[in-house]
Image: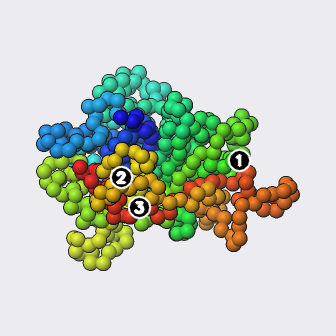
Amino acid sequence: MAPKRKIIIDCDPGVDDVIGLLLAFNAPDIEIALVSLCFGNVDTAASLRNVIATLSVLGRESEFRKERGLPALQFDPADRAAWPTVACGSDEPMSEVRHTADYYHGVDGLGGVHAALPELSTPADYRLPFVPDAQLTPAEVEAKRAATAAVVGYVPSDREPADLVLEILAAEPAGTVTIVALAPMTNLAHAALRNPAVFSRAAAVNAMGGAIAVAGNMSPLAEFNVFADPEASAVVYAMTSPSPLSTMPPAIARTLSDETRAALAAVPAPIELNLFPLDITFQYSLKRTEFMAAAAPLAAAGSPLARWMSYWMEVTFDKMRVLIGVKGADDPNADLLIRLHDPLTVWYTVLGQPDASPSVLTHYPSGAPILPSEFQFARASDVRIETTGQWTTGACIVEHRPGATKRVYTSPAESAQDYGRWLDAEAGNRVNVAAPGPAPAAFVRALLATLFP
Ligand SMILES: [Ca+2]
């Protein structure tokens, strides 16, 4: 059997993040080395609680399936080697003030599920193993040791995600670990600036974020993950450049030490950034009727995962009814849906290589395989993030002037006339922007078959 591919998931669960996590944990041939949390949809404490609850529910589901003789889940907490490290990261963006989206996800990020189904929630002291000793009293450190030792299904860490990301990338062969970015990019930007050379060892960063040719969802131009920390996105995007300093945002550039500048100038290779912007993710959604058809029979049979997920999915479908309004809203079968922004990005990641072993994730219902090559990309696009605009902060700026082609500047004076050095062979960013991929209906069927085998 081929070794499992290692991935790191940086997220802010959040409804669609949890669906993405469930997809990743149930994917074959994938090892999740780290789940790191960033502020975003909700704060990191709430995100952490949701990740812990997700892993705990997966553990219960695993038991339930064994008892009933149902097909096993890919993630089995009985397998100690499969436990991911979980770490709590930034609660503040690199600059500016914090924005969250709890109007959509509920104050706990999952529609109030922890209060509604306490038997499927987390222990009260769930945060203790994640707090550094320096912030605790000796008695609390003792309690932390005991709480940490009792954890099953994951390895809690009290360290910063940026350091853990770098440690994993340094320990594994270069080009083998993929980072899945489902939140504001604060943790990842800190990692990139802390050690650009090690950060560049990532096989790729597959990121949900940005609005390229469509309206944003936080402002007319900005998508949430970018808007919540534009500097962080700009830093990670800059790591795709042959010259990262050429697109480093001003607020960050002026804080860089000489040492960091030198390290950025000497990065061995630009990172591969595969971006899934709103333009594409909006086309993938899960309808209430589709979800209920898959989950309701299992929930009725007592499946912990189906019961838990049904609760917060129903709350979110109802939220959609209020937020956008639907035709025939009194009809319980009305076409309510949840956008699959984060799960789509996870799906691309777990599909893996074209020669990967066949799995439920890689087949259309007809049996025809879905290949990663079905995802099309506008490759090496010079996408940059606006960080200083009054109304445009978080916008993705893309060269689209008529006739623009790759430029070769023959002298410094000539390149100075194009202040941004757009499409310059030696400057600017190189982002792979996803275009429409496999049929949305195929993804929904693969997703549901994976979550509820
Ligand atoms: Ca997210």
- The residue where tag 3 is placed is 438
Q: Could you tell me if residue 227 is visible in this image? A: no
- In the image, taking residue 23 as reference, residue 208 lies left or right, namely right
Residue at 45%, 58% (x, y): give it: 374
Task: Categorize mark 3 by other alpha carbons within 10 Å: few (<14), some (14-19), many (20+).
Answer: some
- Secondary structure of the residue carrying tag 3 is loop
Q: Is residue 166 above or below residue 250?
A: above
Whichever of labels 2 and 3 marks the residue nearer the N terminus, that label is 2
> What amino acid does circle 1 point to?
Ser
- Secondary structure of the residue carrying tag 1 is loop
Q: Name the mark on residue 362.
A: 2
Residue at 37%, 31% (x, y): give it: 155
> What amino acid does circle 3 point to?
Pro
Which image quadrant for residue 199? top right
Whichever of labels 2 and 1 marks the residue nearer the N terminus, that label is 1
The reply to whether callout 3 and callout 1 are in contact (CB within 8 Å) is no
Task: Categorize mark 2 by other alpha carbons within 10 Å: few (<14), some (14-19), many (20+).
Answer: many
- The residue closer to the viewer here, 17 or 348, is 348
Q: Name the mark on residue 243.
A: 1
Q: Is residue 423 above or below residue 76?
A: below
Whichever of labels 3 and 1 marks the residue nearer the N terminus, that label is 1
Q: CA distance from mark 3 to mark 1?
A: 34 Å
Which image quadrant for residue 270? top right
- Secondary structure of the residue carrying tag 2 is helix
Residue at 66%, 38% (x, y): give it: 268
Q: Is residue 391 above or below residue 180?
A: below
Residue at 46%, 64% (x, y): give it: 436
- Residue 56 in the image, given as x and y percentages of width and height: 27, 39
> What amino acid does circle 2 point to?
Thr
The reply to whether callout 2 and callout 1 are in contact (CB within 8 Å) is no
Mark 2 sits near ligand 1, with its Cβ under 8 Å away? no
